[in-house]
Image (tube, helix red, strand yellow):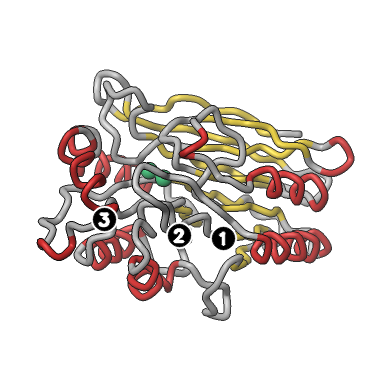
Amino acid sequence: MADRMFTLAHLSDPHLAPLPEPSWGELIGKRITGYVNWQKKRRFIHDPATLAAIVADMKAQAPDHIAVTGDLANIGLAAEFPRGREWLDTLGSPDKVTFVPGNHDIYVREAAVFTARQWGAYMTDDQGAGGFPFVRRRNNIALIGLSTGVPTAPFLATGWLGSKQLAELAATLNELNKENLFRVILLHHPPETEASQHKRLLDAHVLKRVIAAHGADLVLHGHDHLNMINWLDGPKGTRVPAVGVSSASALPGSDKDPATYNIFRIDGTRGGWQCELMSRGVTSSGEIAQLRTLALRD
Ligand SMILES: [Fe+2]
Ligand SMILES: [Fe+2]
C-alpha cells in the first residue's frame, strides 16, 4: 500500500444556495449586513446547478479522498446547517471526506455549536475525536485540519488560528515528519494573499513561521474565491506550495474565478515525493473543462 498513488480532490466555498428564509429573530447583528449582501450580490454568483456539475465532474475522477475547505453556509442561519450536512453526505461518507470550517460557517457565535453538531463527523481525527488541529492518515498521506473560523464584527471576514492551535500544529508536523508522511494542511484562509486586511488570516505570519520551521508538503485553502498558488518557505531552503481554489458554485462573469476543483496526484516517498495538480472548472462558455496540469515540486 505504501507507494500506491493517492488522489486527493479539493473544492471550497460552495456557499450553498438559495439562502433559506430567515426568521425575524435571526435577522439581528451581523446577519443583517450578510443578508443584504446576499440579496444584492452573492445570490447572482453562487449557483446550485454549477455546484452540482462541479461535484459530478469531480466524482467522475473517482478521487481517493475529498477535502472541502469551508464556507458551506452563508450567514449562519439554523436551516443552513442540516442542509450543509446533506450536501456533505452527497460527497461521500465522513471517512472519505474531510471538512474544515470557514468564516461563513462560524458567522455568528452560536454557529460554532451548529457547525460542530451537524458537520462534526467530517472534522475528526481517525479515532473520531474533534478539535483542531485534527489528523487523518490515508495511505502515506496525512491530512491536518485547522480552523480559522472565528465570529467577527460586521464587514470583517478575518481569520485567526491562535497560539494554542499553532503550537499543536508545530508538534503535529514534527511527529508526521518522523512517520515519513506527505503532510497536507487544510485551512480556509490563505496563508499568503493579495486580499485586503479585513479579509485576511491575522496570524498568517505565525503560521508561515511554523511551516518554515517544521515543514509541510502541501497547503490547501479557499476563501479568496480565486485559483492561486503561492510558494511558502519550508525548512532548509525548501518551498511548500499553498494552493487556493475558487468557489465551487461560482458562475463565470464575476470579479472572482468561476467554479473550479483541483485533483492532486501524490506519489512516491519522502525525499522523492511527486505531486501533480490538475484543475478542472467552468470556462467562460459555461462548460466544465480541464484548465491546467502542473507538477508541484519544491
Ligand atoms: Fe467564501
Ligand atoms: Fe471565507
Q: Position of residue 210 (x, y in %)?
A: 75, 51
CA–CA distance in space, label 2 to label 1 = 8 Å
Q: Position of residue 270 (x, y in %)?
A: 80, 50
> Which residue was labeled with disc 1?
145
Which amino acid, by three-letter code, is at mark 2?
A: Phe
First in sequence: mark 3 or mark 1?
A: 3
Q: Is residue 288 left or right of residue 2?
A: left
Q: Is residue 29 left or right of residue 185?
A: left
Question: Which dot, 3 or 1, sits closer to the camera?
Answer: 3
Q: Where is residue 4, by image quadrant?
A: bottom right
Q: Is residue 276 above or below residue 15?
A: above
* Quadrant where the N terminus is found in the figure: bottom right
Crowding near the residue tagged with mark 2, few <14, some 14–19, many ≥20 C-alpha atoms within 10 Å: many
Circles 2 and 1 in contact, beta carbons < 8 Å: yes
Q: Where is residue 232, by image quadrant?
A: top right
CA–CA distance in space, label 3 to label 1 = 29 Å
Residue at 57% in and 59% down: 146
* Quadrant where the C terminus is found in the figure: top right
Crowding near the residue tagged with mark 1, few <14, some 14–19, many ≥20 C-alpha atoms within 10 Å: many
Question: Which dot, 3 or 2, sits closer to the camera?
Answer: 3
Q: Secondary structure at mark 1?
A: strand
Which amino acid, by three-letter code, is at mark 1?
A: Gly
> Which residue was labeled with disc 3?
29
First in sequence: mark 2 or mark 1?
A: 2
